[in-house]
DNA sequence: GTTTAATCAGATAATTTAATCTGATTAAGA
DNA sequence: TCTTAATCAGATTAAATTATCTGATTAAAC
């Protein structure tokens, strides 16, 4: 198998997109997110806790507590979430796994892969949570029905 | 952490590139590959065994045995190796991990990611082992020195 | 034939990642 | 103040991936 983002990161992205699709300053419980997105509750809870430390979401403890975005959705880029969870090594390390790969000693795919990687990085840097709001709403409605 | 190809697949790609950089029909032991590429010997051996089953490499048993490519390097595409080891799910499954993601019910990144993914797929389909031969030789020489 | 050096097969171990459990703390609301 | 519903912290378990081990088989070279 092969993966772009870890499960943690996929879930984290789904969750912040879900929060962004809600009204401002509304607080959402891990339980609701878990049910709507069909993610294990304790797991998404842990992920959101770590995103709290990263300053991407806020948490409110106690009854009727939950999570909300720490900034305006237009200020949160997808790359910020990825960086907080998976880190940015994927955009630096060699696609063929050569530890010695560098511009001076490039691997056979260095240049071609470099272009693709940069495109992916730019996409994640361009896209902010608010830009994806409408699409997220549609998606969540569809998930909840299934 | 995050990854494009599994370690198995990275090692597999490295190994077949190494074989392609050798003279035709030359047989190379897992031990040599392991040392030159600094990959655990038993592990690369197992990977090459599985690539033998996939028809990408040949194996010769017994003393002075080893592995060689089963086809001409110009007939082996990188995507063939990836497909044999990691499979092609990465080029099909949703980048955000939504199991219900489809053209009818796309995830928020569906279209933008689709373009990048297609580019990556095409690159791996275009590139054959022989095209990368010279670059591989340089790389291996550099690794062996370190 | 015997030795030697290789693949091959299957089991096992180690590590990493994913998921769950337990209990403490917090704060809203009756 | 008490109950309830939430986060939070840390430990534990489960599953997948990565790596190693053991022994069998194979075939070249002496």
Image: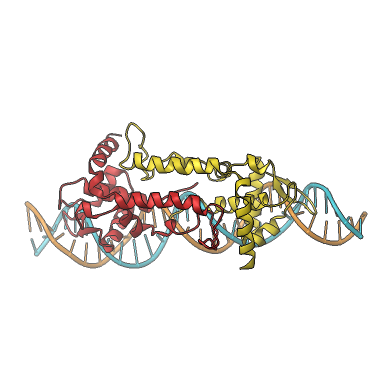
Chain colours: A red, B yellow, C orange, D cyan
- Along the horizontal axis of the image, is B13 left or right of B33? left
- Along the horizontal axis of the image, is A48 left or right of B84? left
Q: A101 or B82, which is in the foreground?
A: A101
Q: Position of residue A27 (x, y in %)?
A: 17, 52
Q: Is residue B7 visible?
A: yes
Give the vertical position of A48 relative to B49 (above or below).
below
Q: How many marks on residues? A: 0
The C terminus of chain A appears in which quarter of the rendering? top left
Q: Position of residue A23 (x, y in %)?
A: 15, 47
Q: D17 or C11, which is in the foreground?
A: D17
The image quadrant that residue C14 belongs to is bottom right
Q: Is residue A12 visible?
A: no
Q: Residue at x 29, y 44 (%)?
A: A37
Q: Residue furthest top?
A: B104
Q: Residue at x 25, y 54 (%)?
A: A76
Q: Position of residue A110 (x, y in %)?
A: 51, 54
Give the vertical position of B41 relative to B83 (above or below).
below
Q: Residue at x 43, y 56 (%)?
A: A90
Q: Position of residue B106 (x, y in %)?
A: 33, 36
Q: A127 or A84, which is in the foreground?
A: A127
The image quadrant that residue B95 belongs to is top left
Q: Residue at x 72, y 53 (%)?
A: B28
């Amino acid at each position: 198998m092969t993966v772009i983002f870890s499960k943690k990161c996929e879930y984290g992205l789904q969750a912040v997109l879900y929060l962004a699709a809600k009204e401002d300053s509304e607080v959402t419980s891990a339980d609701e997110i878990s049910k709507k997105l069909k993610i294990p509750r304790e797991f998404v809870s842990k992920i959101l806790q770590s995103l709290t430390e990263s300053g991407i979401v806020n948490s409110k403890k106690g009854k009727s507590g939950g999570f909300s975005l720490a900034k305006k959705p237009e200020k949160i880029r997808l790359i910020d979430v990825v960086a907080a969870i998976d880190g940015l090594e994927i955009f630096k390390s060699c696609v063929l796994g050569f530890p010695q790969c560098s511009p001076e000693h490039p691997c056979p795919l260095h240049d071609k892969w470099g272009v693709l990687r940069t495109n992916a990085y730019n996409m994640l840097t361009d896209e902010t949570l608010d830009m994806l709001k409408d699409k997220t709403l549609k998606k969540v409605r569809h998930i909840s029905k299934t």
